Image: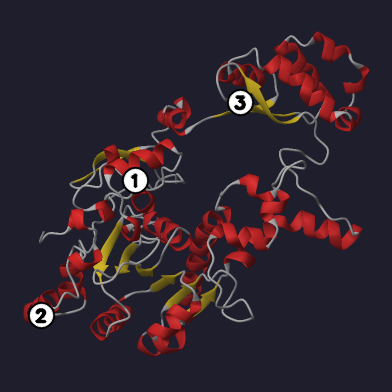
Amino acid sequence: MLPLDGVKVAAVTVVWAGPHCTQVLAEWGAEVIRVEPIDAIQPYSRGAERIATKEQVIVSVKNGLTLSAYPDYDPGQEPWNRNPGFNSHSRNKKSMACNIMTPEGKMAFLKLIKEVDVLVENNVPTTIEKAGITYDTLKEINPRLIMLRMPAYGLSGPYKGYRAFGTHVEAMIGHHYIRGYPDGTPDETGEAFTADAFAGLLGATAITAALRYRDTTGEGQQIEMPLAEGFLPNLGEFILDFEMNNRVAGPQGNTHHSHAPHGVFPTSGDDQWIAIDVSEDEEWFSLCEVLGADTLASDTRFHTQLSRFQNRDFLHDELNKYTIKHQKFNLFVELQQSGVCAGPVTDDVELLESPQLIDRGFFEELESPVIGKHRYPGIMTKWVGTPNSIRTPPPRLGEHTEEIYKQLLGYSDEEYNKLLEEGHVGDRYPDHLLPDFLKTSK
C-alpha cells in the first residue's frame, strides 16, 4: 500500500509545474486522471501544436534541441504519444478525453469533480474563469474538494492575467540575474525552469497537508500557490542581505561568498569538467596533493581561506592548469577519498551509465505499444517498508476515456457512443488539426 492509495486526482495541467506535481502524487499512490481535449490542441502538453517530420527533428537535434525529439527521431502516426517531454512526467497517470470549454466536456468534468479528492491546474487564471470551473463553483458540487491552483503570479494583483513559464518567473524575481556570471549577461544562463521543478514538489506537499486537514475537519479548500511566490524564498539570503545591509547581490555564477576555490574546472578530453568546492585549509592542501600542485600549495597567497578568496580569480586560472591533466571521474573519486567536495559534470548519456544510479536501481524500464521500451527516471524517494516502483507507462491520448466515462462517471453505452460519434471523445486528434502527412483521409 502506498501513502496516497485511494486518493483520486483530476489534472488540467500543462508544461511542467502542474504535471510534475501530479507525477509526484501518482508516485505516492494517487490515481491521477489527466483531463485533455481531443477536439482541440492543448498547447505545451503533448507537443501536438508543433509536430515535426523526422527530417525536421534530426535538424533540431543537431542544433541541440532535444526536448521534442521522438524515439529514433520518428514522429510515427501518433507523435503526441511519442513526445519525450510529455512522457517523462506522465507515467502512472490516466488520460480522459474531455474539453472543458465545450458544454459536453464541462458536463463530464463536473461529474468527475464529484468523484475526485483533488483538482490540480496550472493555467493562466483567466482560462479557468472562462471555463467556469473556479473553486467557488466546484466546491458547491464537492465540498470536500481540494483545488490546487498554480498561476505564475497569483489569482489577484496587476499580474494576475500574465502568462509565463518557469523561466519567465525566475527572470521576474531575479533568479536569472543572480545565477548569471559577473562578466556576462542573464541570457547566457539558459533555461533551467527551476521554478517549475520546485513548484511541483511544493504543490504535492501542500496537497498532502490539505488532505490531512480534511481528514481532521472534513473540509476541502483551495490552495493558491503562485510559481513566483513559491520560488522566491529560495533567494531569501540575498533578500535579507539587502534588507539588513543595503547590499545588492550581483551575478554569482559559480562563485561562493567565502569559499575558494569554488567552481567548475576543465579536465582532460573535449568539453569535460569537474566541480570543486574547498571550504577549509585542510581541504585545500589535500586538493593540491591530489593534483600534484606543489607550487600552489607553497604559495602564501593561498594558505588561508580568506587569502584564497581574495585571490580567487588568479587561483582559479592557475588551478585550471592542473585539473586539465586529469580524467574527471578518476579525479572525482580521488578528491572525495581525500576529503575534498567534488563531482564530475556529466552529460545525459553519462548519467544513464552512472554506477551509483545503476547500483541503486534508480532507472526503470517501461514499455509502451507506441514508443517501445525505454528507461525512465525512477521514484525520487525510498521508504522503509513501503516498496514502490513505476506502475504504468505514460498514457496514450484518451486511453482511459471509455473506462472513466462508463465506470466512474456512469455514462451509458448509448451516451458514450454519441459523444464518440460527435468527436468529443476518442484517442486521436481529428484530421483538420493535423499536418498533411498525418491525416487519415489523404
**Mark seen at residue 273:** 3
Instruction: Give the number of marks.
Output: 3
Q: Kindly identify the amino acid type of the residue bearing the numbered disc 2.
A: Lys
Of mark 1 and mark 3, the one earlier in the sequence is 3
Residue 264: where, in percent of width, then height?
67, 30
Q: Which residue is mark 2?
A: 418
Label placed on residue 4: none
Residue shown at the point (18%, 72%) measured from the top left: 425
Q: Amino acid at mark 3?
A: Trp
Q: Nearer the viewer, mark 1 or mark 3?
A: 3
Q: CA distance from mark 1 to mark 2?
A: 38 Å
The answer to whether residue 369 is left or right of residue 125 is left
Give the side of residue 28 with respect to residue 264, left or right: left
Q: Secondary structure at mark 2?
A: helix
Mark 1 to mark 3: distance in Å? 33 Å
Q: Please tell me which of labels 2 and 3 falls first in the chain.
A: 3
The residue that label 1 is drawn on is 389
* Mark 3 Cα shell of 10 Å, populated few (<14), some (14-19), many (≥20): many
**In the displayed structure, does residue 414 sit left or right of residue 48?**
left
Task: Indicate the position of residue 419 as horizontal and vertical percent values.
Answer: 14, 78
